[in-house]
Amino acid sequence: MTTHISKAPGAGTPAPRTTLLRAITAAGGLATVASTFLAWTWTSDFPGDLTVYGYPGGLQVLTLALGLATLLFAVAALDVRGLRWLTPAGSTAALRLLALGAFATTWFTLLAIAVDQGGLVNLEPGGWVAAVATAVPVATAFLLTDDTRPVCRPRQLPSWADILIIAAVFALGLYVVNYGIQTDEDNPEPFIGYLIALCFAAAAFLKAGLITRLSGLTSTYRSLTLVAALVTALVFPFTQDKASYTELGVNIAIFATVALGLNIVVGLAGLLDLGYVAFLGVGAYTAALVSGTAASTIHVTFPFWAAMLAGALASLVFGVLIGAPTLRLRGDYLAIVTLGFGEIFRIAVSNLDGTSGPSVTNGPNGVPNIPPLEIFGFNFDDEHSFAGFTLDSNSNYYLLMLLVTVIVVLIFSRAGNSRIGRAWVAIREDETAATAMGINGFRVKLIAFALGATLAGVAGTIWAHVQTTVVPEQYVFAGPVPPNSTFLLAAVILGGMGTIGGPLLGAALLFLIPEKLEFLQDYQLLAFGIALILLMRFRPEGIIPNRRQQLEYHETGQLDVPDQAALSGSAVGVTKAEA
Amino acid sequence: MTTTTVAQAAPVLTATGVTMRFGGLTAVRSVDLDVHPGEIVGLIGPNGAGKTTFFNCLTGLYVPTEGRVAYRGTVLPPKPHLVTQAGIARTFQNIRLFANMTVLENVLVGRHTRTKEGLWSALLRGPGFKRAEAASKARAMELLEFTGLAAKADHLSRNLPYGEQRKLEIARALASDPGLLLLDEPTAGMNPQETRATEELVFAIRDTGTAVLVIEHDMRFIFNLCDRVAVLVQGEKLVEGSSDVVQSDERVIAAYLGTPFEGEPGAEEAAAVEAAEARTEEDGQ
Ligand SMILES: Nc1ncnc2c1ncn2[C@@H]1O[C@H](COP(=O)(O)OP(=O)(O)OP(=O)(O)O)[C@@H](O)[C@H]1O
Ligand SMILES: [Mg+2]
């Protein structure tokens, strides 16, 4: 066990020992950076090219980024002018996390080389240098005393600087997302390394107070932030060069939108809906049946806007039919009934095949060969060129889906921030008190439930065309491939209930991780479970906490319970790491 | 039964024969109570007397087993939101704020029945919606000023100190512009200064034209405040009348301190002890 420095350094002038430790940490960061320019292994069998002297490749890039961050933060901790903005909430916690991140990423890489290629002999001297160089900052960072302080008010910058910062953050965000999406699909190592690096870096930025600063900035420039987010999302397909990447993009856009719709029901109104995927199914089946495919039992061809409307209406009707009898009840009844409804939908759809029941859905075979969308002569299956960029079919659907996402985001924020949205939150907080304040609980809950169902239906109509086939087995309660109700609910809870960014981020992560880590497929549900348990222990408010939980940043300095929980959580993490 | 002497305007609240049974337990037994406009009426009684249960019957949270509750002459349906809509608002004995909403949002929720913007107008954000939102906010801020919470409008309600949470409950209830306000132990857990301030607040509420029916265990508070006090004991209304009448009623004192059994064997001894005490006192003087 390490001994802690007992004498606190005087305010302003850190003890010489602290300065020394910080300097060593910085040196370690520099050494880490340098080590990534060496070859770590001689064999190019390992994914990414780690055999080159002179420039980093593959997983070395991640070590480089974290080493560089460690270096910068350590220099900032040494009170060098011009870098102090990096650590508004103290540097030690961030340094520990960054050093640990570089250490974990590097050692993971080295061990993966040894395991994959059969032995430590496969490591070049550069690998050993990296191993040592990343261990040093960890040791020194944990010897430093904690200097966590409340985030001070930021210095007033000219607004063009603020705007530039926002733009840079979104550009960086796009780069980071693209890096993850474009990692090697055949080997899990790069993506695992990416996840490790991302987790530690995000935690470090949070601890340094940068995230708090950033959210202060984005709330000052709200509309600008929204535009920046939209532009980033629009640019995304133009930065992809493989159909498999754009396919990831369109799937993430669909599931993120559906998760956001579910967030109205679960996050705002507090109604636990365990059969939400059925509404996606209702929309998808409706669109499939009216799409004009030969497999459809009703031989009509709706234009897409009409199909979308039909899908939305069908889901709305189902939502009201399920909601009306159950929403009068309180508590867990709704969860049980919606769980049942989800399963009934799947089973009913697989039996409406003409033998077990009326012929509507072709039973387990589903409705195949759904023709591509065509809006105003724009065929979504063809490649289209814009200003030198070629957009493939997936990108076309992605851009259409993005439009729906924007609409759902607008609906979420407008409804949430109104009389009806306040009534939802009030019902979620305390239903008895809410009804005593004059809220018709049943009516308000039914509106939330039906709205959520309608939005899922809309997304379903597009999904049917992206998939070109709808089959009942896609709409299960829990399963290895999204969408399923558990997946959607986990996305909402993981990301942060009641927020807009939460479900979007949660769905993206939950979709991307199993896609990239194929060996996880069989254990996906187990991994979900473990991830959710860890989340409930360390960050119960989700990755992106609710606005209400961010009020902590107010001048009045009021305390917030979830953040205290998060603090104690990280304290546990630190003790474990020290032990 | 004591009747009020002055002829008064039609009552805001008329409860007749309200009875509430939970299985074998009769928590409220055939209680009649009127509250007139501009009145502050107190409801007192020992713990478990059925005061809160009576409130729940009035506000539709419980459906009374028997009896009738009318607001300004119209019988109320036993649905809480319709009762609030009609004009009766309440606070809760065990504070039930919307903990994760801000102080302002709590009061805005209280405005729910007095505004009517639905989902469509929220999505379309027309001028009507903006006007209604602004009016709601203005009214809510006014109420926060009135209760002295305006400075904390942006705080989460769970972060307020206890006394202010009680005030916020009152502000939230007032937001529905009620004709009758039901307060369930509004000073529980408050220090004497806060209790005084709450007294002033209740007077101020009455002066705005809202009748008040208040449950409280703090007798000084009740007798300072109330025009009329009703005493509930074991679900039954024992006495009703002015502060003086209630204060000097032996049955009330007995109900609070406990009555000796009729013909209790110890009664004579008790009398003897009392006599002895009286004598020692005389000796001392
Ligand atoms: N929902 C219920 N089910 C069963 N019994 C109940 C219920 N609500 C209240 N009671 C019982 O009714 C009686 C009256 O309770 P009530 O809460 O109305 O008393 P109170 O006068 O408000 O007391 P206090 O001064 O302690 O608040 C108690 O015996 C209580 O246990
Ligand atoms: Mg009570």
Image (cartoon, coloured by chain):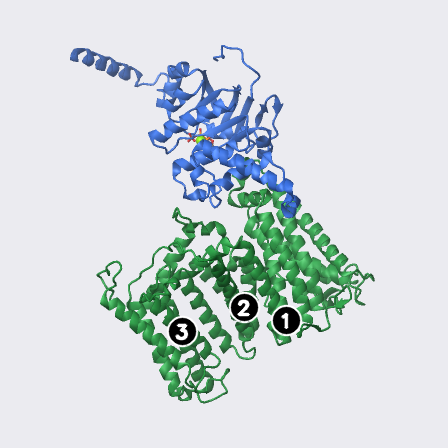
Image quadrant where residue A70 sits: bottom left
The N terminus of chain A appears in which quarter of the rendering? bottom left
The chain identifier of the residue carrying mark 3 reads A
The residue identified by callout 3 is A68
Residue B127 rendering spot, x and y as whole percentages: 64, 42
Question: Going by the picture, which residue comes out furthest to the right?
Answer: A299
Pick the front one: A349 or B244: B244
Pick the front one: B202 or A479: B202
Residue at 40% x, 22% y: name it: B222
Q: How many neighbours does mark 3 have within 10 angstroms: few (below 14), some (14-19), or many (20 or more)?
A: many
Marks 3,1: beta carbons within 8 A: no
Closer to the eye: label 3 or 1: 3
Determine the CA span between mark 3 and mark 1.
Answer: 33 Å
Horizontal side of residue A341 vs B195, given as left or right: right
Give the amino acid type for the residue marked by disc 1 in the picture. Glu
Q: Is residue A306 visible?
A: yes
